[in-house]
Image (cartoon, rainbow, N blue to C red):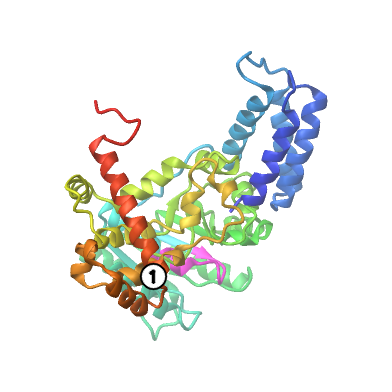
Amino acid sequence: MFENLSERIERSFKLLKGEGKITEINIAEALKDIRRALLDADVSYRIAKQFCDDVKKKAIGQNVLTAVKPQQMIVKIVHDELVALMGSSSSDINVKGSPAVVLVAGLNGSGKTTFSGKLALNLKSKRGMKVLLAACDTFRPAAIDQLNVLGGQVGVVVYSEPESKDPVKVAANAVAKAKREGYSVVIVDTAGRLSVDQELMDEIAAVKKAVNPTETLFVVDAMTGQDAVATAKAFNDRLDFDGVVLTKMDGDTRGGAALSIKAEVGKPIKFVSSGEKMEALDVFHPARIADRILGMGDVVSLVEKAQEQFDEKQARELKKKLARDKFTLWDFYEQIQQVKKMGNIKDLASMIPGMGKALKDVDMDNDSFKGIEAIILSMTPYEREHPEVINGSRRKRIADGSGTSLQEVNRLLKQFEGTRSMMKSVMTGKFPGMRRR
């Protein structure tokens, strides 16, 4: 997300390149471009204008240090204002209680049920909580089945009453079950509609009154832009929710919802969700999003994602294997699986400073690994452990078995040997230019 916005804002900064200081004239042209970029990203005119006015107010008369160029100074000011616009800091959810109750609301198609499953996994795996999912969407026929499937995927119990059409009763019974059986938190998945209507609002308000949630989250599709903001305002007027969840952040979204909701509704964005994988749920960090918008990457989030997938024991064992030159093709295959769990490869690469722009027009996704995986899985266990035995006839068999060409098999084996050699050099401190300390 934010690709077009990032490109437009970065282009506006170039207008100040070579300037000796920030003046009314040179900043006016840059801010005109920034305002247009925000409007194209589906940010409301009022917020875009206020944002640019705030940037201008802070920039004019700024004492620019000799070592800091005007272009660098305006980047910092815009960064700080973006962070302030989106809420300054991350906001945690309130899961204190016996049990805590999290009410999930939103329109049909916003991703409420999928988010409920992701949140259940997040609370279970990262906080060690015993979670109960409550299927209170009695309006959509397949909603209960969908939540049951998701509950099975993440290993969380789902409470449902398939014959009941009373979501208030189902929610109350779910909370009662949680109290009896010692659950830490109940996540209540409610019904949605195609649009905001009185019946929907009355129903959700009744559920909220019955279960008295510790946290009410509004889930909205980030691709709907200013419509998302308008829907959020309507729900907040009736429910007074605690925070927002932006879903489908990996889609073709211009980012207007992320930039506008806090300013328009006064409630923080707490989570962002992308893709269908249950692990693809992240806490919303305004400063990190601002970094990505301005092309600075997001190395902190990248490291956090890596730490979630790679434990210290695995890392130590891998280091020993590399040092002894025992890193195998099967180890290589397992590392690919760990990387894929971290999320979309192109999104991950864009977190590295400078890579987002470089990969803008590159077609890259997790399917890029399919050929490599097919080749490795077409080998015998012995061949994976001892790739040096793979001669010409074995390579031909592997190519036929994996549906690839002999050239692709040869390329993988050559790349693997080069990678193993480089990784060993790095681990042992013998990489050219490195000194062991």
Q: Quadrant of the N terminus?
A: bottom right
The picture places residue 367, in percent across and down from the top left corner, at 45, 67
Res. 384 visible in picture: yes
Q: Is residue 115 above or below residue 30?
A: below
- In the image, taking residue 107 as reference, residue 366 lies left or right, namely left
Query: Residue placed at 25% from the left, 54% from the top?
Result: 128
- In the image, taking residue 88 as reference, residue 303 lies left or right, namely left
The quarter holding residue 340 reads bottom left
The picture places residue 429, in percent across and down from the top left corner, at 26, 34
The picture places residue 92, in percent across and down from the top left corner, at 41, 46
Question: Which residue type carries mark 1?
Answer: Ala
Query: Residue placed at 24% from the left, 25% from the top?
Result: 437
Query: Residue placed at 80% from the left, 33% from the top?
Result: 29
- Extreme right residue here? 25
385 or 163: nearer the viewer:
385
35 or 142: nearer the viewer:
35
Task: Give the labeled residue for mark 1.
Answer: 171
Q: Secondary structure at mark 1?
A: helix
Q: Which residues, given as a range, are shown in magenta?
A: 105-117
Res. 174 visible in picture: no
- Extreme front residue here? 392
Q: Is residue 177 above or below residue 252?
A: below
- In the image, taking residue 286 as reference, residue 97 lies left or right, namely left
The picture places residue 319, in percent across and down from the top left corner, at 21, 46
